[in-house]
Amino acid sequence: MTQVNTQMLGTVRNNWTLAEVRELFALPFADLMYHAQRVHRQHFNPNEVQVSTLLSIKTGACPEDCAYCPQSIRYDTGLEREELMAIDEVLESARAAKAKGATRFCMGAAYRSPKDKQLKVIAEMVRGVRDLGMETCATLGMLTPNQAQTLKDAGLDYYNHNLDSSESFYEKIITTRTYQDRLDTLQNVRDAGINVCCGGILGMGETDQDRAQLLQTLATLPKHPESVPINQLVHVAGTPLKNAAPLDPFEFIRTIAVARLLMPKSHVRLSAGRTDMSDEMQALCFLAGANSIFYGDKLLTTENPEADRDHALFAKLGITPEASTVVAEVCETDHAHEHSHVSAMSNAVAG
Ligand code: SAM
Ligand code: DTB
Ligand code: SF4
């Protein structure tokens, strides 16, 4: 150890150097896992995992050229294009997700940036989902300060906007908008008082250095994102990254552990790619400090593990879903929500 004082790990810092981040990555696996688990336990119940469900509210025909994405209009991925869903349909889907145990509902749209007219409709969706007693999240592309404020006023809890990779590797993956565009949207979201959900994708052909730089950028934002999704690339036929070489699973787990150490109070989400992971690999990710997942058999357009598989995994590991703060607020005023989704997932796990 030359740079990092391991005794100090667990304290929130925003001045991590790249050398420190690289040093954490280079720790022997057992030491890295030990520190990650130790720090995780300082801030979280290690047996609880936050559970979100995703819905694609507007699918395909996106003008951007993100090389990993099945929804870009530039790649023939065989995806059926779908217009913005009706508010009722979205609320129906949120009710179903809640009944199955999700505490957060995340609405994703394949936009470069939403038009104000579209945003008005989405704000109504957010209102409706919040009224169900769920936490709300949206990922709609770039936002102006006013748009972020409109979503905040509608009750949006989280906005997902990923940096995806290091600044230098990003340019090889996306040419239609810059890293700075992404940082600007994150700032607009932060300024509006919405929680930030920001992470990246691993396994796109990036180097160790790129992964370290991505985490360093996230951990040196003025405030750490409250939620940090770590996606494993889903290889989609028709996209330029279809044949990207798979990442060594231990590199993926290390990245989760380093994210846990750099952003000790953030939820780290084991996001896309779980369908291709064994139960043992997912368990190591939880030990490394991941404490959030997407739950439900679909991500946006690709597969996610079946709910039954996740129930079985949670039961085997003794994991229970984390209660949502929004639900607590709503329950105080509305006893109809007493039999919440948390107990639905807990029952499912117990059963
Ligand atoms: N269009 C908006 C945007 O790009 O911000 C919102 C939706 S976009 C699909 C949300 C995120 O999904 C992307 O930033 C990317 O990190 C992730 N994603 C998309 N395709 C993926 C894939 N094939 N594998 C893993 N993650 C993926
Ligand atoms: C995130 O980081 N991962 C989610 C969510 N944010 C929106 C999306 C994963 C998408 C995987 C490809 C698909 O299903 O289309
Ligand atoms: Fe469009 Fe988002 Fe896909 Fe990029 S990641 S092509 S912006 S939907």
Image: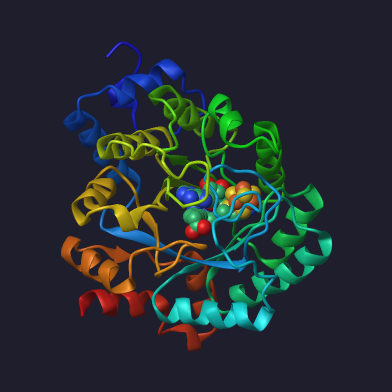
Q: Is residue 13 left or right of residue 305?
A: right
Q: Nearer the viewer, residue 45 or 71?
A: 71
Q: Is residue 341 above or below residue 47?
A: below
Image quadrant of residue 315? bottom left
Q: Is residue 126 left or right of residue 11?
A: right
**Residue pictured at 20% horizontal, 35% vertical:** 34
Q: Nearer the viewer, residue 87 or 299?
A: 299
Please identify the residue farthest to the top as the structure is shown.
2
- Residue 255 image offset from top left, x and y in percent: 35, 35
Image quadrant of residue 183? top right
Quadrant location, the N terminus: top left
Q: Nearer the viewer, residue 33 or 213?
A: 213
Residue 6: tell me if it is visible: yes
- Residue 21 image offset from top left, x and y in percent: 39, 23
Q: Is residue 248 above or below residue 290?
A: above
**Residue pictured at 54% horizontal, 84% vertical:** 334
Image quadrant of residue 180? top right
Quadrant location, the C terminus: bottom left
